Image: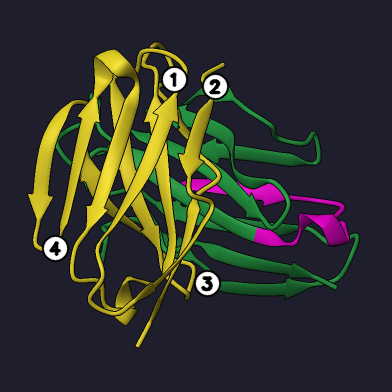
């Protein structure tokens, strides 16, 4: 167990639908990062939150949004889903400074859009 | 932004063989990590190694930050070592996000 918890592990949904992915960071970590891994794009950074505030955006579509709550858990919302959104979505967390372990990743949510 | 290149892209080994995976990066970094993605998709953190050398069992890693490369050594490979090995770097600053290489696909045959 890495200490980063992601739910659900698997999700199958239809095109046009909306889903919410959830991430609980490792205890004490303030930063949460979301990554998307698809077959043709590799591991792509989507967005980062630090202590409840958005810190950086990467290749995140306008149909996607995220937030980090006061208890530091984060949710990634994906709407108007398309077949191409099928991917493995990872959450990672880190402390104020990268510690000797660096960034820790959760086990991912595998999203299949049919 | 920083470019991360990994080589070789694919590698097939017989069980018991040794291998070296390489990661080149295009700019100074303050974070470098090696990950193993197993066949179930989990990303396992192998090393946090922005500089220097570390060892963990049959695995070791060396980063030469001044020359912008890192090496991951796998000795006496086992079938459970199969999967994709990723190098990821962070350049610091406000975000410190990790940028991933394209990975090395390793297959260890019995």
Considering depth in this image, is B72 or B96 the residue closer to the camera? B72
Question: In the image, A109: left or right of A31?
Answer: right
Residue A67 is tagged as none
Would you say residue A85 sits in the magenta stretch? yes
Considering depth in this image, is B98 or B106 the residue closer to the camera? B106
Residue A56 is tagged as 2
Q: How many residues crowd mark 3 within 10 Å: few (<14), some (14–19), many (20+)?
A: some
Going from N to C along the chain, the mark reached first, 2 or 3, is: 3
Residue located at (87% from left, 57% from top): A82
The residue indicated by pointer 4 is B58
Q: Do the residues under discs 3 and 4 have CB atoms within 8 angstroms?
A: no
Q: Secondary structure at mark 2?
A: strand
Give the image quarter of residue A19: bottom right
Q: Nearer the viewer, mark 4 or mark 1?
A: 4
Q: Chain of mark 1?
A: B
* Residues at marks 4 and 1, CA–CA distance in whole angstroms: 33 Å
The residue indicated by pointer 3 is A9
């Amino acid at each position: 167990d890495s200490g980063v918890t992601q739910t659900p592990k698997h999700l199958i949904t239809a095109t046009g639908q909306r889903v919410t992915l959830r991430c609980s960071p490792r205890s004490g970590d303030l930063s949460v990062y979301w990554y998307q891994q698809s077959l043709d794009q590799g591991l792509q950074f989507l967005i980062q939150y630090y202590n409840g505030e958005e810190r950086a955006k990467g290749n995140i579509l306008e149909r996607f949004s995220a937030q980090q709550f006061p208890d530091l858990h984060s949710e990634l919302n994906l709407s108007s889903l398309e077949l191409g959104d099928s991917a493995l979505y990872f959450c990672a967390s880190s402390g104020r400074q990268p510690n000797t372990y660096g960034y820790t990743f959760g086990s991912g949510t595998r999203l299949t859009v049919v | 932004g920083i470019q991360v290149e990994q080589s070789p892209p694919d590698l097939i080994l017989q069980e018991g063989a040794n291998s070296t995976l390489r990661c080149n990066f295009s700019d100074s970094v303050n974070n470098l990590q090696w990950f193993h993605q197993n066949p179930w998709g989990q990303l396992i953190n192998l090393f946090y190694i922005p500089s220097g050398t570390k060892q963990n069992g049959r695995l070791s890693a060396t980063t030469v930050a001044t020359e912008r490369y890192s090496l991951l050594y796998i000795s006496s490979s086992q079938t459970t070592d199969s999967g994709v090995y990723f190098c990821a770097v962070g350049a610091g600053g406000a975000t410190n996000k990790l940028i991933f290489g394209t990975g090395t696909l390793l297959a260890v045959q019995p």
